[in-house]
């Protein structure tokens, strides 16, 4: 996912032992539009061939997403 990769390259740093640290992610400062893009990409990879409703909201202490998955595949029933 290019948007996430760009954000990590912009805001992240590599610590000893190859640990990637992105302070804005740790401090729950990820913006809703980036979270929605991540959630959609996740849904496409996790449930290929299924209808998935993805919602992202920030009415809690942190931005987060929810998924509603149609268990019947539109590709093969």
Image (spheres, grey):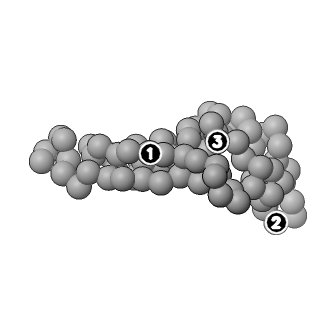
- The foreground one among 64 and 50 is 64
Residue 6: horizontal and vertical position, in percent?
72, 35
Mark 1 and mark 3 in contact? Answer it, CB < 8 Å.
no
* Farthest-out residue, left: 77
Q: Quadrant of the N terminus?
A: top right
What's the CA distance linking mark 1 and mark 3? 12 Å
Q: Residue at x 38, y 45 (%)?
A: 53
Query: Badge 1: how crowded within 10 Å, few (<14), some, or many (20+)?
Result: some
Q: Quadrant of residue 38?
A: top right
Depth check, mark 2 against mark 1: the one in front is 1
* Residue identifier under label 2: 17
Which residue is at a point 20% across and 47% down the rendered structure image? 73
Between 61 and 68, the one nearer to me in the picture = 61
In three-dimensional space, the C-alpha distance between marks 2 and 3, rounded to whole angstroms, equals 30 Å
Disc 3 target residue: 32
In the rendered structure, the answer to whether residue 34 lies left or right of residue 13 reads left
Q: Position of residue 14 (x, y in %)?
A: 84, 54
Task: Name the residue: 44% across, 45% down.
Answer: 54
Q: Earlier in the sequence, mark 1 or mark 3?
A: 3
- Residue 76, position as x, y percentages in the image: 13, 45
Q: Secondary structure at mark 3?
A: helix
- Density class for disc 3 (Cα within 10 Å; few <14, some 14-19, many ≥20) is some
Q: Secondary structure at mark 2?
A: loop
Earlier along the polypeptide chain: callout 2 or callout 1? 2
- Of tags 2 and 3, the one toward the viewer is 3
Q: Which mark is residue 54?
A: 1
Q: Element type at marker 1?
A: strand
Question: Does residue 38 appear in the picture of this structure?
Answer: no
Q: Is residue 20 left or right of residue 44?
A: right
Report whether 24 appears left or right of 34. Answer: right
Residue shown at 85%/50% (left/top)?
13
């Amino acid at each position: 996912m290019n948007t996430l990769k760009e954000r990590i390259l912009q805001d992240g740093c590599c610590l000893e032992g190859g640990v990637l640290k992105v302070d804005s992610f740790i401090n729950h400062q990820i913006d809703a539009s980036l979270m929605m893009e991540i959630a959609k990409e996740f849904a496409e990879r996790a449930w290929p061939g299924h209808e998935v409703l993805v919602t992202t909201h920030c009415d809690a202490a942190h931005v987060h997403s929810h998924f509603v998955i149609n268990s019947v595949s539109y590709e093969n029933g």
